[in-house]
Image (spheres, helix red, strand yellow):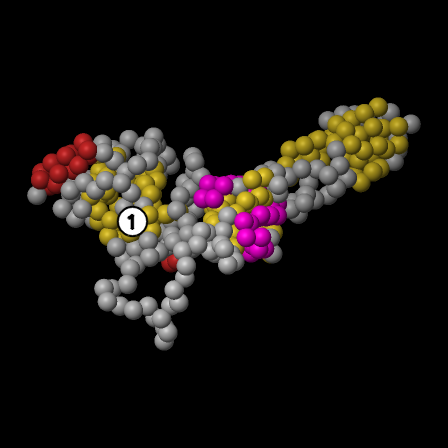
Amino acid sequence: MKRIMTAVAAAALAIGFAPQAFAANTQVMWTGANGAPVSGTPGVAAGDTLHFVLGKFPSGHGLYAYEAVQPAAGTRPTQTSAAIPALTMWISADPTAPSHPTQVLAFTIDNGNAWGADCAHQQCGLWFQYDHTNVADKSEDQFVPFTFIAAPLASGTAPTGANPAPVTLAIPADTLAVTANGVALVENVPGSITYRTPLTFAAKTGSGVVVTLKSYTPDLCPVNGLVVDALKGTGVCDIAVISTGDAMHAPKTAHFPLMLSPATQSLTTTTAAVKVGKSVALTSTTAFGEKITYKSSSKNCSVSGAAVKGLKAGSCTINATAPGTANYGALKASVLVTVKK
């Protein structure tokens, strides 16, 4: 049976792969349950099963496969199903592995809600990386997308509700020109937002109506009116700009993904002046509450805590450092102090 599956996989892989290029050596191709190749990006609803085969599987190590939200280029995803056993897959030649690289593999998809995502509004797919035997090696990291669709109503089933839905005229959707802090955004194209550095959205609509904002990732990027903040330094946010339209324009909802990035800590004061024998106080903490450590690199002044004392006329450089976190980088800066007689 394995020999048959290997032949099916080889034939499928000769035809083509999921339409996204990766540096990973392993090749992934969507198929039917029988291993027959499927062209294009598959559309799936929650509960559907994706089938695929693998080519050029790495020797000596296995792979993990998870459902995930597409990460920023060069990074591993922060939203994945890795913590849910039913939504993970270990693929290995190891006899104890539940899935083997010579098989037609099957992965059951969910909507992402169980692991903090929303595949109806975020780009989801399968994420592949080396397994526990080589987890630090990122050379096999790759994201293979699928299209998430709402499950259709069963044939002959009427929409829920006592009254039938009203018939609406086919009018064009409203148009949106959206900016964030004055920079134009493009629908469905990732923008960026820095930790605790709010973005103010503005939108011009063809209908002239005022838009509203909705965050589909409020734990990462809450919305207050037209202002979006970032509560973490990594991840992906999904912000929707919504127009209700008017008599000539149908409602429009546009999604603007935002890649989160860490903030940079800096000093509010980079120069100071002090008289010989006197002291001047420098800022003791960063804007994020981290304690600043000061050290003098000159004999013209000394440092005690955040206080600089002038020893003799001239200038001295005070080096400032503070620790960082995943949300903001470490501080490394300097203060130029002028010591006067």
Lateral position of residue 204 relative to residue 78, left or right: right
Q: 196 or 238: which is nearer to us?
A: 238
Which residue appears at 33% of the width and 57% of the height? 150
Q: Residue 273: percent from the left, percent from the top?
A: 84, 32
- Is residue 318 in the magenta section? no
- Is residue 207 in the magenta section? yes
The quadrant holding residue 114 is: bottom left
As drawn, 18 above or below 255: above
As drawn, 284 above or below 121: above
Which residue appears at 62% of the width and 43% of the height? 181
Looking at this view, name the residue that lies furthest to the top.
Answer: 314
Which residue appears at 13% of the width and 38% of the height? 8
What is the span of residues highlighted in magenta in the rendered image? Answer: 186-213
As drawn, 191 above or below 227: above
Q: How many marks?
A: 1
Q: Residue 175: percent from the left, percent from the top?
A: 50, 48
Q: 184 or 102: which is nearer to us?
A: 184
Residue named by callout 1? 43
Q: Is residue 315 visible?
A: yes
Q: Quadrant of the N terminus?
A: top left
Q: Residue 44: percent from the left, percent from the top?
A: 29, 52
Q: Amino acid at mark 1?
A: Gly
Q: How many neighbours does mark 1 have within 10 angstroms: few (below 14), some (14-19), or many (20 or more)?
A: few
Q: 28 or 279: which is nearer to us?
A: 28
Q: Residue 216: percent from the left, percent from the top?
A: 47, 55
Which residue appears at 33% of the width and 48% of the height? 147
Q: Secondary structure at mark 1?
A: strand
Q: Quadrant of the C terminus?
A: top right
Q: Is residue 237 visible?
A: no
Looking at this view, name the residue that lies furthest to the bottom.
Answer: 162
Lateral position of residue 57 relative to residue 190, left or right: left
